[in-house]
Image (tube, rainbow, N blue to C red):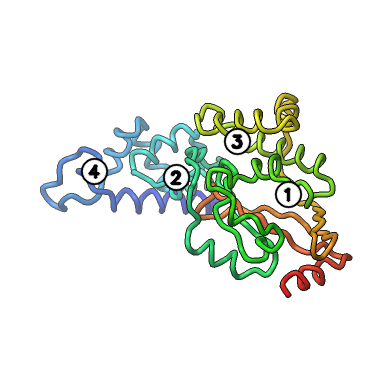
Amino acid sequence: MADSRRTELGGFLRDRRTQLSRTEVGLPPRSRGGDTGLRREEVSYLSGVSVTWYTWLEQGRDINPSRQVLESIARTLRLDASEHAYVLSLLGYSAPPAASAPPSHEAPAHLKRLLDAWDVPAFALAPDWGVLAWNEAYERLYPGIGSVAPENRNLLWMVFTDGYVRRLLPDWELTSRRFLSEFRAETGPRLGDPAHGVLVERLREASPEFRAGWDSRDIQRFASRERLFDHPDVGLLHLEHHQLALSDHPEIHVVVYTPMPGTDAAERLARLRE
């Protein structure tokens, strides 16, 4: 482990220790010095770590504390999620698992502005694959998106039940199964969520193809790839499908369709704008 990383860890812990409110961790204010700042001995006691070991950490000594020790110290120092992950990363540990986020029902304003800045089709997906927002280019690709009832404005629901979407995808059988396997891979943690169960049961009743695909239990992680769209106004579009996560809202994914290199997709999208 590079000494610079150990030095940074020691300095970071020392900084947070001296800034922490004593009453926040259940300790009385000092007679001199007030409520701010803990002693090393106090941090070690509250964390269940020896004073010597904690002192060596702050001094940047060549030691290898376990993840459990760092987790305990992070809790004592009341580190937030970013600070907690930073401390772990300095000694080569992965970030703690993020709490499972509930489905978002509205896109942040800055995300809507980002979508509107693109002249290629793009939209935002909630964790349950509800479509939260889209830009004009996407609405030109799928003109019915704005009129879909909010409870049905879910990408998987539209792929398996909307006749326009089915006609739009010349390889619908392949694409729909691919979407389903990606949906299952992403939403595994939500299997106990009643809303997830309702969506799956609605789809099982509405679509025999969904029912067969769901029962097959295929799993596939997302990968950027070429997509084909047979638009009634401009014909066959060769687009590349990308998916991005927002740093400040990682539960929301942004889907972007860009022209596939070596095709006339850019010209056809321009004609669609006109």
Label whose residue precedes the other's in the sequence (2 or 4): 4
C-alpha distance separating marks 2 and 1: 44 Å
Q: Secondary structure at mark 1?
A: helix
Which dot marks residue 187?
3
Eye-nearest disc, 3 or 1: 1
Is the Cβ of the residue at disc 4 closer than 8 Å to that at disc 3?
Answer: no
Query: Could you say where residue 252 lies in the image, as x and y percent from the top left?
Result: 55, 50
Q: Tell me if I can see residue 63 in this picture.
A: no
**To which residue does mark 4 refer?**
24
Which dot marks residue 165?
1
**To which residue does mark 2 refer?**
84
Residue drawn at x 37%, y 42% is 55
C-alpha distance separating marks 1 and 4: 55 Å
C-alpha distance separating marks 3 and 2: 26 Å
Nearer to us in this view, 56 or 32: 32
Query: Could you say where residue 66 lies in the image, as x and y percent from the top left?
Result: 50, 33
Q: Residues within 10 Å of mark 1 (few under 14, many from 20)?
A: some
Name the amino acid, label 1.
Val
Quarter of the image with the C terminus in it: bottom right
